[in-house]
Image (tube, rainbow, N blue to C red):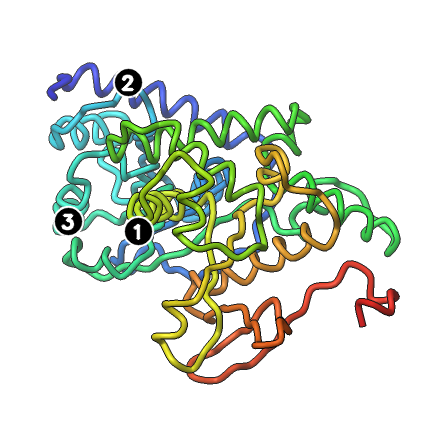
Amino acid sequence: MHYGDAMVRDILLLQKRELESRLRDPYIHRDINPHWNLRDGMLKVITGPRRAGKSFYAMHLLQDAGPFGYVNFDDERLVGLDNYDEIINGLDSVYGSPDLILFDEIQNLQRWELFLNRLQRQGRLLVVTGSNANLLSSELSTHLTGRHLAAAVFPFSFGEYLKALGREQTAAEKAESLFSYAADGGYPEPLLKRTDRGNYLRTLLQATIYKDIIRRFNIRGVQGIEDLALYLMSNVGRQYSLKALSEVTKCRSPRTIEKYMGYLREAYLVFDLRRFSFKVRDQIRSPGKIYCTDSGMAVSAGFRFSPDRGALYENLVAGRLKQGELAGRVSIFYWKGGQNEEVDFVVKEGPRVTRLIQVCADVSNERTL
């Protein structure tokens, strides 16, 4: 769709004002340190869930490097735009031919990989964000001619959450804050702006399902994928099989369940672990164990998820380990033996198992030990 240079320029001018306004907002420094040189010519990819703070992080990252251009493709005014010349002309007009450019939610641009390849050939220095897990995968290498570096931004860690509270805490206060953090989640906006957290997270869940799944993959059975998402979030830390999920949701086909599960993973709503085994075949055939990217969203959206400390803390640990797996540092599994003995998390670094982690809310209880 052709918008015309003037219209695209006007939209980018409005986006520039929004960018300048956002950069004046309070910023909590994120515990992310990819050690990037933004001027080394490699594409930088920042991905993660919607509203987790990846755009704000990217803005501050580029601000420290000097002047930069900015286009937000998660903007209804740009829906359907596929004339790359209009985008480039608008950028050059508004920002004075910037060599450093941030593209927000790049997956919303049709054939985005062709656009990025073209700009890289021209010598532009690019940082892109996206709410699609495939932007971090090896599949990205098949689309881009140049090398790229990737990082994931998730909702606040506990340390970042404490920074956002803005006051020093005693050990006892931190213990209670940990439970609040686990129950409320780490999404920055409701914490920093004191908005209704439950309503915010439910609205965010619906927006993610619609924008990143239903609209993107042209799904007609809307109720089926919504039911599946809610069921999974209501059963974090539990094992599942595709057959069992097909029996408790409106998705009657295990094949459909498998496809929808992939969509939910790509949108960073849920992730799953496989049972540890030295035999890959056994890993593939074993039941999965489901977790939610943000425990607060699971509490807000779930209709069975009980906010007890043990379940909440297990989901927290799973999320933190998952970030390490996405960064390529570790592989994570769970383990269950023939007598139902279980280890919550098995952590591998390369071929070696380096950690076994059991999550406990109260180690003073003899039954726990």
Nearer to us in this view, 48 or 358 = 358
Q: Is the residue 21 above or below the residue 155 in the image?
A: above
Q: Name the residue under label 2.
A: 77
What's under tag 1, amino acid-wise?
A: Asn
Instruction: Report how far apart the C-alphas of labels 1 and 3 lie in the structure.
Output: 17 Å
Q: Is the residue 25 above or below the residue 161 in the image?
A: above
**Percent position (x, y) of residue 43?**
27, 54
What's under tag 3, amino acid-wise?
A: Asn
Q: Is 284 situated left or right of 109 in this image? A: right
Q: Is the residue 132 above or below the residue 25 in the image?
A: below
Considering every residue shown, the one lying at the far bottom of the view is 352
Q: Mark 2 near mark 1, Cβ–Cβ under 8 Å?
A: no
Residue plotted at (87% across, 65% down): 365
Q: Which mark is residue 134?
A: 1
Secondary structure of residue under mark 1? helix
The quadrant holding residue 71 is: top left
Q: Mark 3 points at which residue?
A: 117
Q: Give the crowd class for mark 2: few <14, some 14-19, many >=20 residues within 10 Å.
A: some
Instruction: Report how far apart the C-alphas of labels 3 and 2 lie in the structure.
Output: 24 Å
Which of marks 2 and 3 precedes in the sequence?
Answer: 2
Mark 2 or 1, closer to the camera: 1
The quadrant holding residue 354 is: bottom right
**Percent position (x, y) of residue 316?**
63, 54
Secondary structure of residue under mark 2? helix
Which of marks 1 and 2 precedes in the sequence?
Answer: 2
**Percent position (x, y) of residue 54?**
46, 43
Residue plotted at (63% across, 28% down): 198
Residue plotted at (59% across, 32% down): 189
Mark 1 or 3, closer to the camera: 1
**Percent position (x, y) of residue 293?**
52, 48
